[in-house]
Image (cartoon, helix red, strand yellow):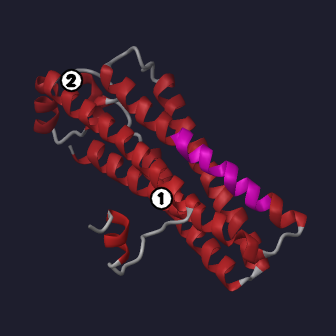
């Protein structure tokens, strides 16, 4: 009787392989996705608990972002967080710059790589600063995490997403340091592709969360 190894050797086929860096990034994507999925579940639980407030807001065509500013009928008299729209546009432009960085890296254009690297870094930094300004606007209006669950929920989303964006700046800074050191552009291709995929992923996460808060 043939052993199992002999039987297996009779079958032709290959194995599916994925480079270790991409495997690690995909695992990171899964962890981040689960984290923000749990936040989304917590959001809908918040809607159930505070159903009367959401019904009142819906009657006035108000969104969750309006609820973040206050609890009760007074939220309609407060200014909207218009800066969130600006921050979203900045993050979108940053993702476009990262795509340009990846294309320039593949073509081996060192000058373009430097330009796109600076643009992407500047836009990402501007996004983080903008999110901090939004939090300070809330604080200036007298609304903190302890004021209402809506404010706490919004700040948690912004903080966690901001931390992940800030974490992406670290490998991007490493690309700049290697480029400054004189490394060949071809040697930076993998890390740039990983960073670009990470930027696109965080953009999608933010757009989904922002749409959820805005349209609900």
Determine the secondary structure under disc 2: helix
Provide residue 35's location: percent of width, then percent of height.
38, 38
Residue positioned 69% across, 48% down in the render: 170
Q: Residues within 10 Å of mark 2 (few under 14, many from 20)?
A: few
**Which part of the image, by quadrant, shows the C terminus?**
top left
Residue 75, quarter of the rendered image: top left
Q: Nearer the viewer, residue 150 or 113?
A: 113
| Nearer to us: label 1 or label 2 | 1
Q: Residues within 10 Å of mark 1 (few under 14, many from 20)?
A: some
Residue bearing the label numbered 1:
89
Residue 85 in sight in this render: yes
Helix, strand or loop for the magenta stretch, by majority: helix
Provide residue 208's location: percent of width, then percent of height.
33, 51
Which mark is drawn over residue 73?
2
* Cα distance between the residues tagged 1 and 2: 30 Å
Is 169 a magenta residue? Answer: yes
Provide residue 142's location: percent of width, then percent of height.
45, 18
Q: Nearer the viewer, residue 146 or 4?
A: 4
Asked whether, in this view, residue 175 is left or right of residue 41, the answer is right
In terms of sequence position, does the residue under pointer 1 or pointer 2 come before the other? Answer: 2
Residue positioned 64% across, 68% down in the render: 190
Q: Taking 182 as reference, is 126 above or below it?
A: above
**Range shown magenta:** 162-176
């Amino acid at each position: 009787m043939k052993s199992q190894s002999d039987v297996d050797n009779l079958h032709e086929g290959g194995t599916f392989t994925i480079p270790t860096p991409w495997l690690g990034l995909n695992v990171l994507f899964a962890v981040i996705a689960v984290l923000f999925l749990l936040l989304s579940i917590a959001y809908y639980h918040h809607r159930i608990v505070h159903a009367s407030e959401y019904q009142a807001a819906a009657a006035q065509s108000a969104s969750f972002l309006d609820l973040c500013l206050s609890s009760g009928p007074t939220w309609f008299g407060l200014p909207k967080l218009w800066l969130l729209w600006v921050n979203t546009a900045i993050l979108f432009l940053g993702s476009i710059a990262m795509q340009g960085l990846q294309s320039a890296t593949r073509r081996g254009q060192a000058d373009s790589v430097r330009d796109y690297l600076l643009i992407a870094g500047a836009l990402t930094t501007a996004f983080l600063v903008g999110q901090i300004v939004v939090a300070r606007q809330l604080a200036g209006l007298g609304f903190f995490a302890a004021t209402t669950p809506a404010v706490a929920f919004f700040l948690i989303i912004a903080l966690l997403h901001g931390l992940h964006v800030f974490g992406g700046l670290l490998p991007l800074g490493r690309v700049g340091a290697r480029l400054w050191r004189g490394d060949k552009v071809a040697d930076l291709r993998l890390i740039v592709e990983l960073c670009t995929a990470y930027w696109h992923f965080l953009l999608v996460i933010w757009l989904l969360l922002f749409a959820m808060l805005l349209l609900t």
